[in-house]
Amino acid sequence: MEIGIPEAFLERMAWLLGDEYPAFLASYEEPSLIGLRVNTLKLTPEAFRLIAPFDLSQRVPWCPEGFIVPVEEHPGQHPFHAAGLYYIQDPGAMAVARLLDPQPGDWVLDLCAAPGGKATHLAALLQGEGLLIANDIDRARARILVKNMERWGARNVVVTSERPDRLVERWAGCFDRVLVDAPCSGEGMFRKSEAARQEWKPALIAGAARRQQQILEAAAALVQPGGRLAYVTCTFAPEENEGVIAHFLARHPEFEIIRPPWYPGFASGRPDWLEGDRSGLDDGLWHTVRLWPHRAPAEGHFIALMRRRGEVAYDDVPRARVQAPPASARRAYEAFCAETLTINLDGELGWWGSTLYLVPTSLPDFRGVRVLRPGLPLGAIRKGRFEPAHALAMALRATEVRNMLRLSLSDPRVFAYLRGESFPSHGDDGWVLVTVEGYPLGWGRRTRGLLKSRYPRSLRGR
Ligand SMILES: C[S@@+](CC[C@H](N)C(=O)[O-])C[C@H]1O[C@@H](n2cnc3c(N)ncnc32)[C@H](O)[C@@H]1O
């Protein structure tokens, strides 16, 4: 096997899969797939097809906004990626948010969210209504999540970096949907990730299962009656999949497995691979989903969808009290809005770490929770003037600003802008929303016929 799949793993898979093993093994000879999920906050898949320079003939069966694209087309380096028109994601991972099925208006918590593949999908399915809290315990990874959310342009997303049990202290029973995309032994990623192959050893599995149980325990407390909980891994080990769920259901009779919609390529969970007595639990476990690289256009995944019994009851959850901005900051922001925007943005203005935020109108009390993004960053005050945030540009539509520079994809100024260069541009002085094919790339500042790129330095290409 050229890509160095661990022998002990293969031996175990041969034993578990039996007759199916040769097909599974052959899947490692195939390249991993690149999936592209269209950002439906910005455009429909149909509108994207009209402008996309990629081969979009292969659709993802379980995700109408998902496509499988040829690796050599490098969609990660395209200006449409900078414009947040899509997220590059394993097609299998696209099943998760679709099965959790958040409804606009819901409160959704993604407990292990970084770098943000599934969180961006959840935000898109909310369609700007309700609230997504995207959390990751690892602060550095949570910062990457903030960046990906910025590009995605979602307004109603809060990013936190906290231990799940600490979130329970504040938000027990608050959420309509909770996702646990658990840290795992990563066996399902062997085809695409050398790091996953190198880090794997059999001893990882038991430790991962213990950690997963702990995270799931906290997640359960965060779901409100009638709400849904999805547990996901990207590994094949039954101990981390059916085993964790069997253990969880034995402790939590208030949860039941629900049968998800079934798509071509889905395979059933395998409770028969578990050891020990699981009387009464097996029926539900057959309705968990396994994605196999030899059966579906996907890397390996496991998904269990559960429901907390009971009726949804919207108790009065204590709401967040956000610090109001200083009067001077508010005035500078209002002057910017009058000069630049054609709309009023919905939400409360908050002041957090010297940045002005648009805080979602419904937000639970977050005292004691480490928050990295309490809503949509609007901008900061520099030398007494309002400087709009890149995140604000990404959350606007071209029609929502007075000054817009519309560049076509073939215009060399697109790449000049993304490299941070200035170029001549006629029109009124002031803030200009620079767009590619009508979709925002970021801010520019025009002064006497010269437009200076304000594309963030950290994102600039060569
Ligand atoms: C599989 S990755 C998540 C991938 C992400 N959901 C996505 O779709 O892009 C698992 C994440 O769990 C985080 N993690 C590890 N232990 C955790 C814990 N106890 N609580 C919350 N997150 C944790 C890791 O930092 C990692 O980012």
Image (tube, rainbow, N blue to C red):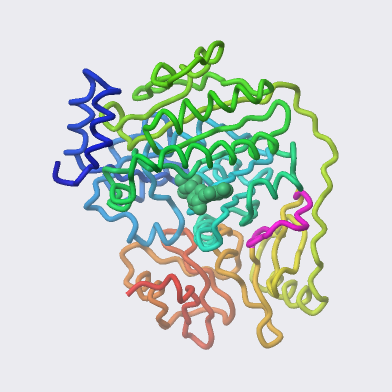
Seen in the picture, residue 256 relative to 166 is either above or below; the reply is above
Determine whether, in the image, residue 261 is placed left or right of residue 174.
left
Q: Residue at x 45, y 66 (%)?
A: 406
Looking at the figure, which quarter contains the C terminus? bottom left
Magenta stretch in the rendered image: 363-376
Looking at the figure, which quarter contains the N terminus? top left
Between 303 and 296, the one nearer to me in the picture: 303
Between 390 and 250, the one nearer to me in the picture: 250
Q: Position of residue 229 (x, y in %)?
A: 60, 32
Between 20 and 230, the one nearer to me in the picture: 20
Q: Residue at x 21, y 52 (%)?
A: 72
Seen in the picture, residue 301 relative to 441 is either above or below; the reply is above
Determine whether, in the image, residue 254 is placed left or right of residue 75.
right
**Does the magenta portion include 366?**
yes
Specify whether residue 139 is in view: yes
Q: Residue at x 53, y 16 (%)?
A: 284
Location of residue 179 by image quarter: top right
Specify whether residue 116 is in view: no
Seen in the picture, residue 172 relative to 338 is either above or below; the reply is above
Q: Position of residue 342 (x, y in %)?
A: 66, 63
**Does the magenta portion include 158?**
no
Q: Position of residue 67 (x, y in %)?
A: 35, 40
Q: Position of residue 96 (x, y in %)?
A: 48, 35
Determine whether, in the image, residue 64 is placed left or right of residue 160.
left
Q: Taken as a whole, is the magenta stretch helix, strand or loop?
A: loop
Location of residue 22 by image quarter: top left
Determine whether, in the image, residue 28 is placed left or right of residue 321.
left
Q: How many marks?
A: 0
Seen in the picture, residue 166 relative to 144 is either above or below; the reply is above
